[in-house]
Image (cartoon, rainbow, N blue to C red):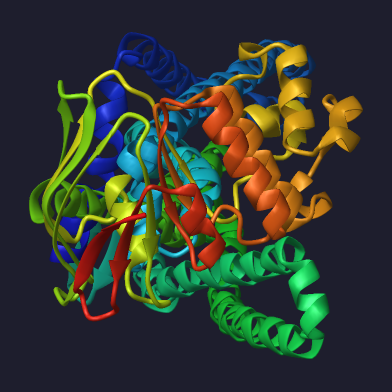
């Protein structure tokens, strides 16, 4: 076995092993055992049908009416059993497939969301394109192909063993005169089928090997094109304001050109493969008759024997040609496996970076203060962004972080939140206290307005009366009667209204430590002043840390942390 095959088998084992030893292992193994049993039963029925060919066609050749009707009755029974097995073979295989996919989907979602891996992957850009496709599409294809191809391979092997024995028994020896010497080939039909399939398989692999990389690229290009269309919908207003339709169209055309060009190559390669496989399987219809005809015309076998040989040869040839028939699926399966393994490895890499390479430690503290000790914030390449910072904030304190754009203000808040792993130092957060970080543009899930207002808490966690009161206080009275309206609220609400939604969340969640990253940048100064005043009145014990550029924010805070853009900082009392 070559290195390529070893690597592929290792990757398959990496992706499959956990499910079969998971909490669902007994149900999974039970379903697999039933599927294996049905697969073997399927082959056994095929063997019985092959024997039936002999009886039926001999009855026709001998004009034996009684034997003819008896054979038809036997066929009805065999056909009924075959249909039952075929139905439940597919049904139970799909049952195992969807259960396996469910388990893998939950597992991948958990790993992707664990400790904000999804965010760090975007931050570091480790090369995993379209992780949403990995979880939705690739997992579906992986479970489907793994079960169908592995069970199909098992069926091919069992069928091969069963029908090789039959074909060996039926074919007899072939005598080839070579002058005064005679060459005898026992079971010559078996060797003919083997040679036919080996040549066909070798040519199929040679012609179809490029399909693996082409399928891999096709999935990636399709996902990139689809993602660019989604971004137009998400940022439609900004694009419309800029009049960027021409540029967006150019981007779409460029991305679709990759889809088109790769698919064209895929078509060309698939055409070459189809030319060969179509001819191969058409020739396979007549090939067993040709090689068995000498014995038939010599009177050594009857018509029933000839048809049985044709059927058995076809089964042997089909089994040996399994790779030829499934090569396109095998190529796509390998591409899917490569994408999933790459996704897993990148998530592991992110986890390793977050656990082992970061010097920023966030620890719980019994002290009722938010404390930063020697925090050095860096860029991913190791360059220092903020020199070692030490500060302590107690309950009810307020701090404003200011500085020129790009100096690291928002990155400092990301570090406080555990989103930025680059740097050294320690951050102590009071144990048992609630913390809330509010970005400049809050995320609004598609759903009811109530769900958007309470995010990430569940809809039933706060009464409607409390929600409406907070909406009044944050100047969102016009939406009080729309709590159960389902919309994409990020497209309906203005940026200022979305920022007021964030303040409703703050009032409803009542955090002990509140971090605001330019959370009032889209609001006018009177509204900004009213909201900060509201926080002081309603949440007097909440510690507030704000990042902003406006001078008006100074009046709402007691301390100011000024960062100068070269990494230096200073702390001032206001």
For the image, the number of numbered tags is 0
* Quadrant where the N terminus is found in the figure: bottom left
**Residue 411 picture location, percent across and down:** 33, 62
**Residue 549 picture location, percent across and down:** 50, 68
The extreme front residue here reads: 574
Q: Is residue 540 visible to the viewer in this orientation of the structure? A: yes
Residue at the image point whose x is 38% and y is 17% from the top: 28
Q: Nearer the viewer, residue 512 or 297?
A: 512
Residue at the image point whose x is 31% and y is 13% from the top: 23
Residue at the image point whose x is 32% and y is 45% from the top: 417
Residue 474 falls in which quadrant of the image? Answer: top right
Residue 456 falls in which quadrant of the image? Answer: top right
Q: Nearer the viewer, residue 133 or 218?
A: 133
Q: Relative to 231, is 316 on the left or the right?
A: left
Q: Relative to 137, is 514 on the left or the right?
A: left
Q: Is residue 51 visible to the viewer in this orientation of the structure? A: no
**Residue 277 picture location, percent across and down:** 55, 68
| 343 to 418, vertically: above or below | below
Q: Relative to 574, is 292 on the left or the right?
A: right
* Quadrant where the C terminus is found in the figure: bottom left
| 43 to 573, vertically: above or below | above
| 123 to 430, vertically: above or below | below
**Residue 538 picture location, percent across and down:** 57, 25
| 300 to 174, vertically: above or below | above
Q: Nearer the viewer, residue 30 or 255?
A: 255
């Amino acid at each position: 076995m070559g290195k390529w095959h070893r690597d592929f088998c290792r990757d398959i084992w990496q992706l499959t092993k956990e499910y079969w030893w998971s909490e669902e292992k007994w149900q999974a193994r039970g379903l697999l055992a039933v599927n294996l049993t049905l697969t073997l039963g399927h082959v056994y029925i095929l063997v019985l049908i092959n024997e039936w060919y002999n009886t039926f066609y001999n009855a026709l050749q001998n004009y034996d009416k009684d034997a003819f009707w008896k054979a038809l009755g036997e066929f009805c029974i065999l056909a009924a059993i075959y249909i039952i097995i075929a139905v439940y073979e597919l049904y139970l295989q799909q049952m195992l497939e969807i259960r396996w996919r469910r388990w893998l989907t939950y597992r991948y979602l958990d790993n992707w969301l664990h400790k904000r891996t999804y965010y760090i992957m975007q931050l570091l850009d480790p090369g995993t394109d379209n992780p949403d496709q990995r979880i939705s599409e690739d997992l579906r294809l992986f479970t489907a192909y793994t079960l169908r191809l592995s069970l199909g391979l098992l069926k091919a092997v069992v069928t091969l063993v069963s029908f090789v024995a039959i074909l060996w028994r039926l074919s007899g020896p072939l005598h080839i005169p070579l002058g005064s010497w005679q060459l005898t080939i026992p079971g010559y039909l078996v060797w003919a089928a083997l040679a036919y399939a080996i040549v066909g398989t070798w040519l199929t692999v040679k012609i179809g090997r490029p399909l693996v990389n082409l399928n891999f690229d096709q999935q990636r290009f399709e996902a990139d094109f689809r993602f660019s269309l989604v971004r137009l919908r998400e940022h439609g207003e900004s694009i419309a304001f800029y009049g960027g339709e021409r540029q967006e169209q150019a981007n779409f055309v460029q991305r679709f050109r990759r889809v088109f060009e790769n698919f064209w190559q895929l078509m060309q390669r698939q055409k070459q493969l189809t030319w060969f496989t179509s001819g191969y399987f058409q020739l396979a219809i007549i090939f067993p008759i040709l090689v068995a005809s000498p014995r038939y015309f010599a009177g050594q076998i009857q018509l029933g024997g000839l048809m049985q040989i044709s059927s058995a040869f076809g089964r042997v040839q089909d089994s040996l040609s399994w790779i030829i028939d499934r090569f396109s699926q095998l190529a796509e399966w390998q591409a899917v496996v490569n994408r999933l393994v790459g996704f897993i490895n990148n998530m592991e890499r992110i986890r390793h970076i977050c656990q082992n390479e970061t010097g920023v430690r966030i620890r719980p503290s019994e002290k009722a203060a938010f404390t930063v000790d020697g925090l050095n914030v860096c860029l991913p390449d190791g360059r220092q962004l903020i020199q070692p910072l030490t500060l302590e904030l107690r309950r009810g304190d307020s701090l404003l972080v200011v500085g020129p754009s790009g100096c690291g203000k928002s990155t400092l808040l990301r570090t406080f939140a555990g989103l930025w792993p680059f740097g050294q130092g320690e951050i102590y957060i009071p144990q048992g206290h609630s913390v809330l970080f509010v970005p400049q543009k809050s995320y609004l899930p598609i759903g009811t307005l109530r769900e958007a207002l309470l995010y990430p808490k569940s809809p039933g966690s706060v009464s409607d009366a409390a929600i409406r009161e907070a909406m009044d206080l944050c100047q969102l009275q016009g939406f009080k009667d729309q709590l159960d309206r389902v919309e994409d609220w990020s497209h309906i609400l203005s940026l200022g209204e979305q920022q007021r939604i964030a303040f409703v969340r703050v009032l409803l969640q009542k955090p002990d430590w509140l971090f605001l990253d330019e959370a009032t940048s889209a609001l006018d100064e009177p509204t900004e002043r009213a909201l900060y005043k509201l926080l002081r009145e309603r949440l007097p014990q909440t510690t507030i840390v704000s990042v902003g550029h406006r001078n008006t924010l100074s009046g709402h805070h007691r301390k100011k942390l000024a960062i100068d853009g070269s990494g230096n900082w200073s702390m001032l009392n206001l």
